[in-house]
Amino acid sequence: MSKSGPTVTTFSSLIGFALRRLSARVLAGVRVLLWQRPVSVIPARVMFAPEALVDPDPAVAADIYAGVFALAGVVVDASARSPFMIDAPSPDWARALHSFGWLHHLDAQADRLSSSNARALFDEWLAAPSANGDIANEPDVMADRLYAWLVQSPLLLIGADPAFRQRYMRALGRHMRRLERALALLPKGMTRLRVAATLAIAGTVIADEGRLARKAMGALADAVSDEILPDGGHASRSPEALLTILAVLIPLREALTRRQLPTPDFLRETIDRVFPMLRFFRYGDGGLATFHGTGIVSPALMEAALDYDDVQGHPAPNARYSGYQRLAAGGTVVLFDTGRAPPPSHAQRAHASTLAFEFAHGATRLVVNCGALERARPDWIAAARASAAQSTLVIAERSSAKVLERWPLVGYLGPVLYRGPRRVDVTREGLTARADHDGYHDAFGLLHERTLALSDDGLWLDGTDRLIGPDRLDGYPFVVRFHLGPNVKARLEPKRNRVLMTLPDSAIWLFGLDEGPGLALEDSIVLVGPRQVRRTTQIVVAGNSLTDDTVRWHIARHAAPLDIEAESAEDIEPE
């Protein structure tokens, strides 16, 4: 038996975290004022461009040439004026615009016309008042912009006159120095890691910036030790965070190799640990599991990152430090969340998903969590993070963890997930994993226990959900939810207490109850694109702890084809 996941976050620990964060910022500010060394404003030259993990898209380039910017799920036609001079339709759109991540698409043709267009947009940004706004100067936005400018330095500088080259180099220098100062003020978290990695890249590819490279590398080593768990997972418990980290660490490693500089041990070891964990969360469709705020990632980006995996390590079945179990056999992958809430510094997007699971066979996801619905509709963030949006058991419509809403802490710390399970006990034997958590104990005096057992051929999954404790006799209502993937059609057969599910390849799977209350089908929604959701179905098992303390169910492949008629999943347009 093992205890899984990070330390539970209580309200008192949130206050302690807030005080530590404030103290760190004050001390860092004093350090910057006292010890910041004066440095040259204009760097010497960019020796070479760092690598980008994704290829440019000619279609996106054509839109940009026409003045159309499709960013953060919103399309804006700026053909009549500079995109930096219009009112941004949303903060996320503004962040995507000022991050310049779209710039690499102009490299799809890489001719003088595209270079001229890129330089014009660069100069428009320099002249725009919004370039000095709060969003444009957020550290993560500045880091993304600096990295994009470095990656596309050949595109920007081909055919450029000396005056533009000076503007470009001065802008690089200004970003490097501002980020260097910001780095000392940033608290623990993904932003600090990304800023440190970006500065290390800049110090490596720009001539005479060895001091910056060394300083940033030291900060990056500290950030990595805070962010990456011993099993290669991320402190936020988000699978997507691993891809975000690799997207900056891989270019840094490749830049050091190109400069014939030694790769620090921590950098090499971190990348080698993260790759197997990325494979741990990967399904047969090439995407990632959707736990803890993970969105729909680009399969092309996944493949591009994995192309740099020199070790090709296989994922371990038990990610104890990250708080997950992986059951895999015969083309089936079951991922089981057996962890607690992340620490406060990494819990702003965490979900109340303890003992939730996802089930995928081949390229089809049969059982999923709803995912980061707020990426399509910001007002769905509370619903997306609730336990009801995960494939797990919920007592009295109450989540197993809370989202911080109290003022002023929420204004300072953000919507941190806290007061989740204090203890999650896990046992594992072969393809069987059992776990229980106490997230409902304070409110109801009950523990939730779930056991998942996958057959050797991957075609049968046995599940048991049990409520433990004398207070179950008080008769609390509960619901066990199984959100179905968007490509799964379902039909209820109430007399046989089962659901028939058909997959895109016409294969039939059954969901059945061996013991417990009856089944129902209800509507659900899941994230299916970067900012796109789709209507789907959820299997619902409703009961009462007094009479139905144990629910035994199974998911199994049906041997013979059946005729199932059900409505197809339907896209939902974001508002």
Image (spheres, rainbow, N blue to C red):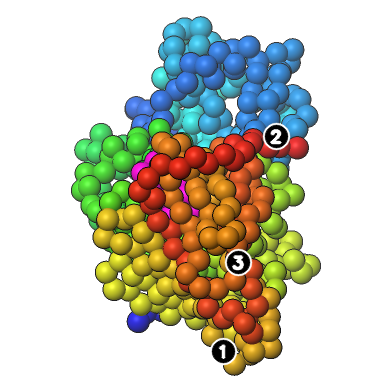
> Residue 268: x, y in percent?
27, 51
Residue type at mark 1? Gly
To which quarter of the image does residue 258 belong?
A: top left
Cα–Cα span, label 3 and label 1? 23 Å
Identify the secondary structure beneath mark 2.
Answer: loop
**Which quarter of the image is occupied by the C terminus?**
top right
Q: Amino acid at mark 3?
A: Gly
Which residue matches tag 1?
Answer: 469
- Spatial CA distance of label 2 from label 3 is 33 Å
SS type, badge 1: loop
How far across and how far down the image is residue 475, in percent? 68, 84
Q: Nearer the viewer, residue 187 or 168?
A: 187
Q: Residue 142: name its quadrant.
A: top right
Q: Which one is in front in this view, the residue at disc 2 or the one at disc 3?
A: 3
Residue identified by numbered label 3: 518
Above/below status of 401 relative to 259: below
Look at the image and give the residue range highlighted in magenta: 359-368
Q: Rate crowding at label 1 as few (under 14), some (14 to 19) or many (20 or more) other CA atoms within 10 Å.
A: some
Label 3: element kind: loop
Residue 103 in view in this figure:
yes
Residue 439 magenta-highlighted: no
Q: Are marks 2 and 3 in contact (CB under 8 Å)?
A: no
N-term mark: 3 or 1: 1
> Which is in the foreground here, disc 3 or disc 1?
3
Residue 146 as seen in the image, left or right of residue 442: left
Identify which amino acid the numbered label 2 is placed on.
Glu
In the visual, does 418 lie left or right of 464? right
Specify the principal SS of the magenta part: strand
